[in-house]
Amino acid sequence: MNVHPAEAVSVVLLLLVLAGAVFRPWGRSEALVAVPAAGTVVAVGALSLDHAAAEAARLGPVIGFLAAVLVLAHLCEREGLFRACGAWMADRAAGSPRRLLVLVFVAASLITAVLSLDATVVLLTPTVFATAARLGVRAGPHLYACAHLANSASLLLPVSNLTNLLAFAASGLTFTRFAALMALPWLVAIGTEYLVIRWFFAGELAAGGRAPNLGRPRELPLSALLTVAATLAGFVVLSAFGAQPVWAAVAGAAVLAVPALARGRTSVRELVHAAALPFCLFVLALGMVVRAVVDNGLGAALGHLLPDGTGLLALFLLAALAAVLANLINNLPAVLVLLPLTAPHPPRRRPGRAARGEHRPQPHLHRLPGHPALAARGARTRHRRAPGRVHPARTGLRAPRALPLRARPVGVAAHSRKLSPAVPATAGARLPRRSEPPHLPALGEL
């Protein structure tokens, strides 16, 4: 398919996929539009089968992790983790809306960081709403906090956000290094949002509430807490060995799923529903459509807009471009578009040239057949490696250890006093004395 028709088809299909995700025709899943669109870009040749397979292989572990962590969060809810969190917030708040806001920030930040933003949106937000109603306070500030923290509190860990996981896979960082780099931005973002929400909802937070009647204290779901902690530790360990975090999420979900199924607390149908398989298909199909758009011209166009360098100004400009693109086509497509353009690549160099600091074996002139040094010094001695020298490849003949000869640059003519450029050196040629600077023929003259 020609470039311009393929580009037009890819862009139109991407817009249709995004519209289907926003408006959800007939109340159906986002995959209803995205999956046929992905099939269309492959069928018309806008995306080759090789590129489609490569995109599926790249997104497969990410999508598997998404499904596993959604199941893990669902099982934590079944174990009573979120109900216990609501009881803890109600007890500590003691009827104070401001104190409840602080507790919501703490709970939402930790749950978003460890169980991903979907757990905060789907499971914690209803718990916060019920807790606010229980205390008789206005729920607006606390619900806004959950909605905003599902975004900003997902900066900390690679597993906190689907886009984090995509960037983490392309960055080459370890799990702990990623968390260390993002810890300060995570704290700054959470602190800024707390101050803004505290100021914006000052009137509603000033109203009082009532102390809850908790009755007997709720038992803490230790099994869920220990499983989540072990899963988080598994993320760190697997990252250290270069393995995908999806296996830790699958193991954590399995640890809670097996006893829950045995006790009848959940069912296979509920687990499949919790995995959000239609949404996983949507992510895969969206990745293929975005890849088609990038391959057919968008990548080259954005490549001209990307700033060069890694300075502060360049990073600010890149962040501004990413923010504009995320608001235009959503954050997930924006990450899928920008990652191939910004991911680190090995430095390019001309064929035959070694990179700086790279060992590239080259033969020394005194080891070539017929050279006078080889004839005069027939002893096989070990070649000493010296710092800063380019060492020859092993050829079976070894240079003398104390040989005071040094190869001249290629292309420089031989000195006319001893050797003529037109006559190659022979085995009978006299070696220069140590006091004289050695002059050897160029490589092309041998």
Image (cartoon, rainbow, N blue to C red):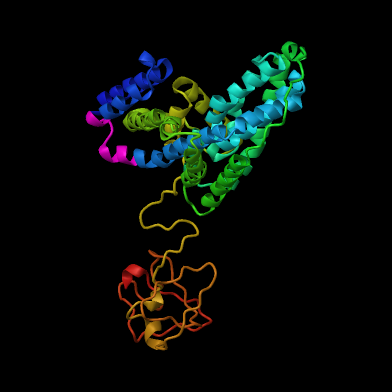
Q: Position of residue 427 (x, y in %)?
A: 34, 85
Q: Give the residue at x 76% y 15%.
A: 209
Corner quadrant of residue 183: top right
Which quarter of the figure is the N terminus placed in? top left
**Nearer to me, 12 or 183:** 183
Corner quadrant of residue 102: top right
Q: Is residue 190 visible?
A: no
Corner quadrant of residue 137: top right
Residue 56's place in the image compared with 390, above or below, is above
Residue 373's place in the image compared with 145, above or below, is below
Q: Is residue 94 left or right of residue 74?
A: right
**Nearer to me, 128 or 369:** 128
Q: Is residue 373 left or right of residue 229?
A: left
**Nearer to me, 375 or 130:** 130
Residue 210's place in the image compared with 273, above or below, is above
Q: Position of residue 391 (x, y in %)?
A: 45, 71
Which quarter of the figure is the C terminus placed in? bottom left
**Nearer to me, 128 or 173:** 128
- State the extent of the magenta-drawn residues as a range: 42-54
Q: Is residue 286 left or right of residue 357?
A: left
Residue 428's place in the image compared with 423, above or below, is below
Q: Main secondary structure of the magenta part?
A: helix
Q: Position of residue 379 (x, y in %)?
A: 42, 88
